Every structure is written in structure tokens, then in C-alpha cells.
Amino acid sequence: MTDHTNDALSQPGLLTPSQSQRLRDLLADLEPGKGSVLTALHRAQHELGWVPRGAISLIAGQLRLTDALIYGPATFYSEFRLTPPPATLVAWCSGPTCRVLGGERIKLILEKTLDCELGQNGPNDDYGLWLGQCNGTCEQAPQVWVNGRVVGKLSLAGSARLAQRIRDGEGAAKIAPPPPGAVEIQPALIRKESP
Amino acid sequence: MTTAFQALRDAAGSPPTAQQRPLLRVDISTSSVAAGADAGLARLRDLVAARGIEIDILTVGSLGLSFAQPTLELQLPGKQPVVYGPVPPDEIEAFLDAVFADPVGQGDDSAWAIGVRGLNGAAGDAQDGVPPLSAHPFWGPQERRVMDQMGVIDPESLDAALAAGRYAALDQALDMEPMAICDLIEAAGVGGRGGGGFPAGRKWKFLLGAPGPTKYLVCNADEGDPGAFVNRILMESDPHLVLEGMIIAARATAASHGFIYIRDEYPLSVVRMRKAVAQAAAAGLLGGDILGTGMSFTLEVVRGAGSYVCGEETGLIASVEGLRGMPKLRPPFPAQRGVFDMPSNVNNTETYAHVPSALLHGSDWYREFGTESDAGTKMFSIGGALQRTGIVEVPFGSSMQALLSDIGGGVPANDKGAGKAKGIQPGGPLGGLLNADDLGLALERPPFTERGVLLGSGGLILFDERACAVDLSLYFSEFCEDESCGRCTTCHGGSQRLVEMLARITQGGGREADLDRLGVVDRALQNANCLHGQFTPYAIRSALRHFRDEVEEHVRDHRCAAKACRGLIRHRVSDPADPALAEAAALCPTDAFVGPDGERTIDDAACVQCGLCAELAPAAIVVEDRFPQAPVAASAAAAAGPSPAAAGA
Ligand SMILES: Cc1cc2nc3c(=O)[nH]c(=O)nc-3n(C[C@H](O)[C@H](O)[C@H](O)COP(=O)(O)O)c2cc1C
Ligand code: SF4
Ligand code: SF4
Ligand code: FES
């Protein structure tokens, strides 16, 4: 299991010069004092797949705020990730329809089979199990999203089989390949490049 | 009519009724994509191109029939449109074969046909053996006022919105005095759809009376209640309706700028709302001189980032400002001090969506539906252990029974036989739990409040006998604890205590005194700053009221009749010879099965009671109470493992 709990504090999370430059360009139009912190964090996360320490400082510089005033929202809001996302992300739906149809047991089966607790990544960040919020596709309940694509109407055995495939190295591209022209229905938490 | 609006309308043309080519509407919304609609659309385009079929493909939002996703609608020249679903990607080819058989329209489409939708709001007639949609239990009882164009028009086209009548109410409002608009909306009784039901017109007057020139309008599209997805379908299917409502509100309040705050879990809503704002601005429906009248109002879309309390209006305002979304004490109310300390007005997305039709048709028309306390219609999203999940619009005051049992089809059959409803969870995580005996309640706020629960913003979840009221209380308490912003000790500490106590009870450590102590925590939580903390105990409070026996059984007897609380049950092999056990053993997440083929048993120390083996080998596994009841033989009690008191330590 790869535990990133303390990464945000212990790792420098430095940006490469080219990442810095791209992020600077992406933030160029944001002005101080206009409530742009969330927008800046979203852009950084969309570009890098997560919000490394270096991005926080860069945003603070652009918006003329202290790092702490960026770090606050970055940790308050659950969609911002201060740790790198896995290559294959299983987001488990925590919503109530999934719950009344067996969701809590599915979480348990995923955690035990992947040997990874909710919020953590497996070895080498190959896969990870994170918490997802209901987005109102409850007709698919109980469900998970694999890199943003729904794998729904899961039985308990089905969730164990899914977890075994992922644990044994099958990635999202095989399990839930996006079609040409795929429409994004989940927040973009998917790794765009190597962290 | 302003000349500017006349020009826009003329340029937009009229809705497609008598088109020359077949028109295929493809639902592209979060629900349909979850069922593969984007893959289906790609397949459809390939096939249509390869076969040279003469057809127009139009992507639309959603009719609300989530249970039948992916849905399609085919309108042949001279005929009424027919709704089909589910048509999964791998059936697209067969579907095309059927509907474009020779002669066209005479093929066998019965595998997918749902009903004939009437044109221009008409009920529709049976056509080629397909019954009208109005005869379908999901559709018939609805009164689709704000939903009238959803799933019909292209949500990414301003022209389509204009042709369907959008912005006609705004054009009318531009001729009215701000106070007259507030009066009309107040007289109609348009109430807040975010849960509170506060009269929108009256709230607008606060902002109108506040000093200018900088005043803000906020659209609350945070829709944080899991299981509620009313605002989402609105934004995905008819974004211009929401904009029109907001611009009318801006006219009524003299607001200068608006924020549409959309939760991050709704990326497609963000895309479509941003597009709509850009289109409206380009057409002069937003900006410095709206439709040539000199009115000035601009709009921007703000993306949330995952925080439930940001749905609370003061938390939302903090979030718009780019801060942590922590609710504040009210007063000051937003109309006094809102976004960036300027006077502001916050309304729910659906509230804004009801404004244009109320303005256009007047208060008598608006009040044709609804009740004394809640006027008009309301959108509901229904789900849970339900046959037909989806989104509907019905008059306030309709019976919940009609909504869940008739429209939703009630509890589907499950492995335990015919399903039986046990209760309803209304109003999101703060809404509480209702017993199925109360299914007959009218869908308006007062009867819900009387029973100690909330009608909320439109999410209703039905649960069956496999669910447990204590387990659900624990679940919602955990949610509230997770989402507490942390400002008040009463809230984050109180919800923590609630979770600890309920977790202990579901693990067999319940004590008689807990029944009172839960009430103590409940009372302490009433001192929390905002409604999040104050409503956190609603789940357990309503469970104690409506599922008293079940809670007492957990506390006193350490027993969960629903066999849902994992700490109170045990899985045991009753028939080691059952061949189905081999697969169960291979999939068991903790490798709890011991012994060779034919002699398998479960190692209770390893088993986490996940239920997988019972699902795969129901004949070979028994699920029994972990703490059997007296009178029991001493040996059986000893075999039951740790005593309740020890388990609760
Ligand atoms: C914890 C909490 C969460 C809330 N979440 C929402 C929400 O997601 N959407 C919403 O419209 N209102 C929500 N509200 C209610 C808002 O504070 C506010 O009353 C509402 O947006 C006002 O709009 P309305 O009058 O049009 O209903 C929430 C309130 C609380 C206390
Ligand atoms: S009651 Fe809870 S959510 Fe509300 S302000 Fe206090 S800590 Fe935050
Ligand atoms: S209940 Fe789950 S953990 Fe226990 S034996 Fe069965 S499959 Fe394994
Ligand atoms: S509860 Fe899981 S999708 Fe709604």
C-alpha cells in the first residue's frame, strides 16, 4: 500500500520548469482580490492531475496571498488532491441509494481485495481507491467509477472480481475504456501525466 | 415586445415539427452517459454514415427517465416522436435495423419502445402499436411545467431555446417595474426549492431595498444532498431556463452581477451552463444593455470543489469568495452582507427555473397546482430500492405513495422474494427517516415537519427490508461528521460522539443508557452555529421516533433483524458439500474460508461479514445473529464468541 498521508508536508512537490511555465500561463488572467482561489486550484489540478506544493506557492504568488490562504481551501475541499492520483482510480460511490443496495459491503470488499483503504493508492500508484460522491446516476447503483467511467449494478461478487482484475494489473483502459468522443461526467481526477 | 427580442426570435426560427427527414434525439446527460450513451452516439454516427441513412441527429438533455437510459427518440416525417429505451450501445445496430426496416416505421421496435410523446405539449396518441407516453405510469401523473422542454431541445443551442419560448418572459419583465415583478412572484407563491420554501418574491424585495449599485445574485447549484439530482438535470437539459429566471430576478432586484455556483461533481452542467452564459452574452441577453433596454447584468459560473456545507448559503458565499466554505452566523443575512460584503440574494436553481412561467402566466395559473403552504409544482428525484429511478415533476401536495409506488413502481423483487418497502429517506442527509406507514403523506413541507423530517430539495429514497434504520442513522451521522466545517465544537464534536455511539451500538455494545444519551447529544447539537449541526441528529431522532423497536432491539438485544449491521451477524457454512462454495472461497476478500473442498468452514476471526459468500452460495451459508437471544443453552452462548459487553469495550 502506498500511503501518501504525509506527502504534502514532507515532500517538496516541486514543479519542473516547464510545469511552472505552463501553470503560470494558465493563471495569467487571474487577478488578486476577485475570489479566484478555487478557479486557480481547479486549473492547476486539471493540468497536473493533483495540486503539488509548488503549485500552491505559485498560485499564492499570482493572487498575492500567503501560501496558507491557498493551502486552507486546498485541504478544505475534498476534490482537491494534495497527493498524486493513481493510474487507475476506483472512485467508490458513497451515496445513499448505493448504500441501501449494498454499497458499504462493496467498499469493504474493494478495500480488502485491493489491500488499500479508502483514500489510498496501491503499490507504485498503479491503482487507488477513493471516495466518490453521488452524482445522481443512482439507477446504476451500487456503482463505482473507474477513471470516471461508470461500472454499475455491482453485485458483491462482481465487485470482488473487479477488484481482483485491477489488483492483478488490468488497468482502466481495459476495464472501462472511454469511447471516442467520451463525455466527462465525473470530476477530472485522472492523471494526465506522470506525477 | 422589444425589437431586439423580436429580431432574436425571428432569427431562431420555429421548433422542428414538420421536418422533412427523420429526426433522432439522443439523450446526452450524466445519466445516459453512465449507461453508455456517448459510446452509443459514436456507434450511431458510424452506422448512419456507413449506410447512408438520411437522418438528422440531435443531442438533447434528458426526459428524466433514468431507469430506461440510454434513451432515444425518433420522429419520422409526419409522425409523432416515439421514445425508446434502454438502447445500449451494442443494440444500436439492431435498433436501426428495426426502425429503418422497409417500409420505414413498420419494423418491430417493440423491444425498445416506451411511448409516443405528443407534440407541443399534447398528450400524444397511440401510433403503430406503440402506446402514448401519457399512459406510462412514470409519465402519466406528471405535470411538466419547468421540465416541458427537457430532453426535447438541444441544451447547447440558444436558437433552440428561443424557438421553444425561452426569454419571452424576460422580454415581458423588461417592461415591468422591479417592485411589480417582486409582487407578482410573491403573489404567485413561488417558494424556495432548496428546502426552506421561503417566498422568493419577498426575499427579492430585501435585495431591491438594499443600497446599490453593486448587488449580487447567486444561483445555488451545489445540490449537495446525495440522491438528489434535480438541479443537475435542469442545467444539463434546459440551461437557458435557469438563466432567464436569473435575469428576471436581476431585473426585479437591480442586481448587477450573478454567480452560478455548481458543485464539482457536475462537470457536464458546468460545460453547458458556461456555454449558455456565453451565448446569452453574445446575443445581448446579458451585458451592459440587455435587449436594448439599458439594463445591465452579467453572469459567471463558479465551480465548487466538494464540500456539503457549501450548499448552505453563507458557506456558499464564502466559497464564491475563494475561501473555505464555512457557514457563518446569520444575521447579517445575505441581503445585508453577502458576496464580498455586498448585498446579495441566494436562490436554488429550480427556484429560478419556476420564475419565467410564473411571470408569463400569472399567479392564478401558478397556483392551479400545489397547496396553501407550497404553491406550484416540484421536481423530485426518486431512487433507492425502486423499480424506476428518475426525475419527475408533480404538483406539491401529491401523495408520496403515488410518486414512489405508481410512478417509481415501488420496491422491485429481490433475492428474498417480492420486495417490501420499509421506509423513506427524504431531504438528504439532514432529512431523517420515515416509516413506510407514512407513504401516504402529501408532498408538501408541513406534514413532513410534523413527523420530524424534512421534505428538502427533492431527493426521495425508498428503502426495503434489507436496510436497517440504525445502520442508516450511523451512515448519515458519518456523512455529517465528515462534512462538518469544523467551526463549532458542538457540531464537529457532537457529530463525532453520535458516530461513536451508533458505531458501538451496531457492534453489539449498546447499553440501555444510550437511548437517553442520544437525546443529550441531540440537544447539545442544537447549539451549533448553522443548520448543518442542528439537523445532524435528525436521522437518529427520527429513527427513535419511527423505528423505535428496531433501535431498542439493537441497543438491548444486540440484534439487527435486517441483518445489515455487520457487527451483529455471523456467516456460517451450513452445507460444506455445496459446490458453489468453491467460488465463494476464491472471491472471499479476507480468505476466511478454511479446509479442503467439501469440508469448508469460515474462520470467524478472519471473516468481515461482507455477505459475498451468502450471495454466491445462498443454500450453503446461513447468516445468524452474533448474539443469540435467551433462552439459549450455555454452550451456544459461549460459542457465540465475545459477550456484547466485551465487543463494545
Ligand atoms: C447544510 C446545508 C446544506 C444546504 N445545501 C443546499 C443545496 O445544496 N442547495 C440549495 O439550493 N440549498 C441548500 N441549502 C439551503 C440554502 O442555505 C438556502 O436556503 C437556499 O439556497 C435558498 O434558496 P431557495 O430559497 O431558493 O430555496 C442548504 C442548507 C444547509 C443548512
Ligand atoms: S454547525 Fe457545523 S457546519 Fe455549521 S458552522 Fe458549525 S461546525 Fe460548521
Ligand atoms: S462473509 Fe465475506 S468475509 Fe466472511 S466468509 Fe463470507 S465472503 Fe468471506
Ligand atoms: S447513490 Fe450512488 S450514484 Fe447516487
Image (spheres, rainbow, N blue to C red):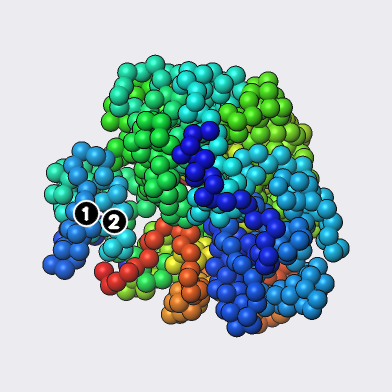
Q: Position of residue B82 (x, y in %)?
A: 74, 60
Give percent across and percent down for residue B645.
54, 43
Name the residue that disc number 2 marks.
A43
Q: Is mark 2 within 8 Å of ligand 1?
A: no
- Image quadrant of residue B369? top right
In this rendering, the answer to whether A55 lies above or below A169 is above
Work out whether residue B405 or residue B66 is closer to the camera in this orientation and state it: B66
Question: Does residue A130 appear to the left or right of B554 in the view shown?
Answer: left
At x 73% / y 37%, what residue is drawn? B400
Report the side of B633 relative to A106 (left or right). Answer: right
Badge 1 marks a residue whose secondary structure is helix
Chain label for disc 1: A
Task: Decide: is B495 above or below B595.
Answer: above
The residue tagged 1 is A27
Q: Callout 2: 10 Å neighbours few (<14), some, many (20+)?
A: some
Can see residue B502?
no
Image mark 2: chain: A
Can see residue B76?
yes
Foreground: A142 or B278? B278
Are both tags, 1 and 2, on one chain? yes
In the rendered structure, are the residues bearing label 1 and label 2 in contact, judged by CB atoms less than 8 Å apart?
Answer: yes
Rendered residue at 58%/57% (across/down): B60
* Residue drawn where x is 67% and y is 61% of the image: B19
Q: Callout 1: few (<14), some (14-19), or many (20+) C-alpha neighbours within 10 Å?
A: many
Q: Which kind of residue does numbered mark 2 sit on?
A: Arg
- Which quadrant holds residue A24? bottom left
Residue A76 is marked as none
Residue B35 location, quadrant:
bottom right
Kind of element beneath mark 2: helix
